[in-house]
Amino acid sequence: RVKDLGLDHIEVKRMARRQMKKKAVKKLAGGREALYLRYERAIADLSTLFDDLRSGRSLNPAKTKAVAAWVAAATDTDRDNALALTAVRNRDEYLCHHSLNVAIFSTALGRVAGVEEADIEGLAFAALLHDVGKATLPSEILRKPGALSSDEWALMSDHPANGVRIIIGQLDEEATAMVVAFEHHLGADLSGYPQVADGWRPHLFSRLVQVADVYDGMTADRSYRRPKLRSEAVALIMGDLAHLFEPALARLFVKMLGIYPIGSVLRLDNGETALVRGVDPGNLKRPIVKTLAGSPGRLIRLADEPSIGIVELVDATIAGVNLSHALSSD
């Protein structure tokens, strides 16, 4: 019957939690659970947006701006919990999760960097669409488990320009989103792509998105590699990859996330396993953690508990930690 209908595949998605309406989300008592469900609904909205583009339909700017407005509000009123949402992943919906996560990281970083409040929502909107040029790429390229061929890489490396074409064609008044889509892979030293003239200075929003884009890409579970631990990605941003970023923004990003970013799983020397739930700006090496044993777990500000040491970082999957549940529960 599927063949008779001319369909080449069927894609199955999780729908139940995402179909909750705004009123249902607001009725939930738990603040983190409500935030998590709103994140899930934003992913569903982005999934629809990208599906529309693949099907030749137009972007829905109103829906995208609604998501941008939520990102702007969440990073203002509940930044740590908004950042915690970025640890929740679904490999099959990488583009949606990545786009939303980059918007959250970029907007939070923009606030720290002093972007004016009047421009914050525009930053969130541009960050949401930074990878819109990938929406029309064949799924076999986006999900290929091995290295891309030269022809496939040519298509992939054209996604910044393709993003510009989409935005010009459908959102011609959104000039900043167009610029960010074009520049987000340039790097501070212009070593990336597309090729530009010497002396080119990327827009501030593009420089913010560059840091967020690389960090979220490294910590994502992709078909061709395992994700890096969040602390490993932080170390690379300040080390081997530092040439890609404006130094001041990279330092602010690391200060915002901490040495052990929210969503990291730690083994403590008292034998307990704990989830990082917050950053202590006064001591980036001593985060706020919640133990994973017991119900509910204990909340510990490690800066106030010098007798408790951090033994090692632990991969959440190997440790059997359900990040979706652990991060969304109050």
Image: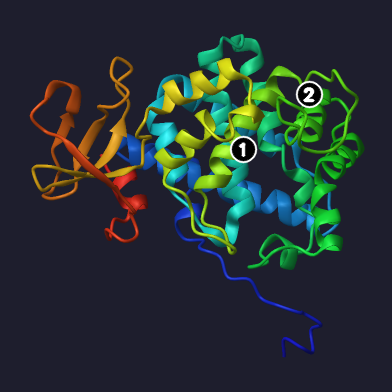
Circle nearer the N terminus (2, 1): 2
53 versus 128 height, above or below: below
Instruction: Give the residue pinned by disc 2.
Output: 176
In the current view of this chain or complex, which residue is farthest to the front?
240
The residue under the point 68% across, 39% down is 63
Label for residue 213? Answer: 1
Q: 10 Å neighbourhood of mark 1: few (<14), some, or many (≥20)?
A: many
Where is residue 154? Give x, y as percent: 86, 54
Q: Name the quarter where the N terminus is drawn.
A: bottom right
What secondary structure is marked by label 2? helix
Q: Nearer the viewer, residue 18 or 189?
A: 189
Q: Quadrant of residue 33?
A: top left
Count the labels in the image.
2
166 versus 284 height, above or below: below
Q: Nearer the viewer, residue 34 or 309?
A: 309
The residue under the point 59% across, 27% down is 69
Q: Is residue 268 left or right of residue 200?
A: left
Label for residue 17? Answer: none
Q: 10 Å neighbourhood of mark 2: few (<14), some, or many (≥20)?
A: some
The amino acid pointed to by label 2 is: Thr
Q: Is residue 19 left or right of residue 98?
A: left
Q: Quadrant of residue 310?
A: top left
The amino acid pointed to by label 1 is: Asp
Q: Is residue 92 left or right of residue 79?
A: right
The residue under the point 36% across, 36% down is 262
Observer-side mark, 2 or 1, equals 1
Where is residue 299? Give x, y as percent: 17, 34
Q: Nearer the viewer, residue 35 or 278?
A: 278
